Image (tube, rainbow, N blue to C red):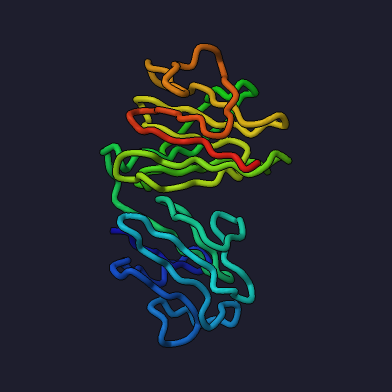
């Protein structure tokens, strides 16, 4: 289960275990997490637990909800994410895991122009499929990765960032990079290369088109791009 560690100016104020499907956060006394500060709205945000995943959604608060310094409307929380409401910082923490379902999301370090890794670190317990990346997106139309098998079948992740990394750390990892001309898949880590439409990746990268099926570490994912 996840927990939230609430702090102000580096001083921990409270710890809250996430045990309910919905956990509310705000200034009003009826919230599950009460932060009595004028910078926090009466009903500021809600945390929703879906299986082992925890999402946070801003409830149209006056001053917004931020994760790791970026304003969000709704986002899946990953281990060690820091939620900011007003001057308060709320760290989301979960137990570390070593199973496949808990090691899919990776946080990229520096990425070279070819898409290869120059240093990756695992983000800890995360959902069975997801994306963390850095940098602003380009002008290419929106695209989505849809998981086709396993426990996460049906889950979709919108590729809004420049680089999205997916896979199982230490086994097989690939990156999907958003370029001015389209999206490309690159092999990052692992003895086996990912396949696209049952064909192993031969070169450094391969361009992706709508409907392509990527197989990576036993997981099949369909690349869907709007026309």
Q: Is residue 60 above or below residue 118?
A: below
Quadrant in which residue 98 is drawn: top left
Q: Position of residue 91 (x, y in %)?
A: 44, 59
Task: Report x, y in % for residue 134.
Answer: 60, 41
Quadrant of the image containing the N terminus: bottom left
User: Camera-side residue: 53 or 110?
Assistant: 53
Residue nearer the viewer, 144 or 102? 144
Q: Quadrant of residue 16?
A: bottom left
Could you tell me residue 198's position as x and y percent?
A: 41, 20
Report how many numbered discs are placed on residues in the image: 0
**Residue under the point 60% across and 24% down:** 207
Taking 111 as reference, is 216 left or right? left
Q: Residue furthest top?
A: 202
Q: Position of residue 227 (x, y in %)?
A: 65, 41
Pick whichever, 91 or 226, lies toward us. 226
Relative height, residue 98 to residue 76 (above, below): above
Question: What residue sits 45% from the left and 29% below the top?
Answer: 214
Residue at left 52%, top 25%? 117
The residue located at (44%, 16%) in the rendering is 200
Q: Is 168 on the left or on the right of 202, as rendered? A: left
Going by the image, does 171 lie left or right of 59? left
Image-quadrant location for residue 58:
bottom right
Image height check: is 135 above or below 39? Answer: above
């Amino acid at each position: 289960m996840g927990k939230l560690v609430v702090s102000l100016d580096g001083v921990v104020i409270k710890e809250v275990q996430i045990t309910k499907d919905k956990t509310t956060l705000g200034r009003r006394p009826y919230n599950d997490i009460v932060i009595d500060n004028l910078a926090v709205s009466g009903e500021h945000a809600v945390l929703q637990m879906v299986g082992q995943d925890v999402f946070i959604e801003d409830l149209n608060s006056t001053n917004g909800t931020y994760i790791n310094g970026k304003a969000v409307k709704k986002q899946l929380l990953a281990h060690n994410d820091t939620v900011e409401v007003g001057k308060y910082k709320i760290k989301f923490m979960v137990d570390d895991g070593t199973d496949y379902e808990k090691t899919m999301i990776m946080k990229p370090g520096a990425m070279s122009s070819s898409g290869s890794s120059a240093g990756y670190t695992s983000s800890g317990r995360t959902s069975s499929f997801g994306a963390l990346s850095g940098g602003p997106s380009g002008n290419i139309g929106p695209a989505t990765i849809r998981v086709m098998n396993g426990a996460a079948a049906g889950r979709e992740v919108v590729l809004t960032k420049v680089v999205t990394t997916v896979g199982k750390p230490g086994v097989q990892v690939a990156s999907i990079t958003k370029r001015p001309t389209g999206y490309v898949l690159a092999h990052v880590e692992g003895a086996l290369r990912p396949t696209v439409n049952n064909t192993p990746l031969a070169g450094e990268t391969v361009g992706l088109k709508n409907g392509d099926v990527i197989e990576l570490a036993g997981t099949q994912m369909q690349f869907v791009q709007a026309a």
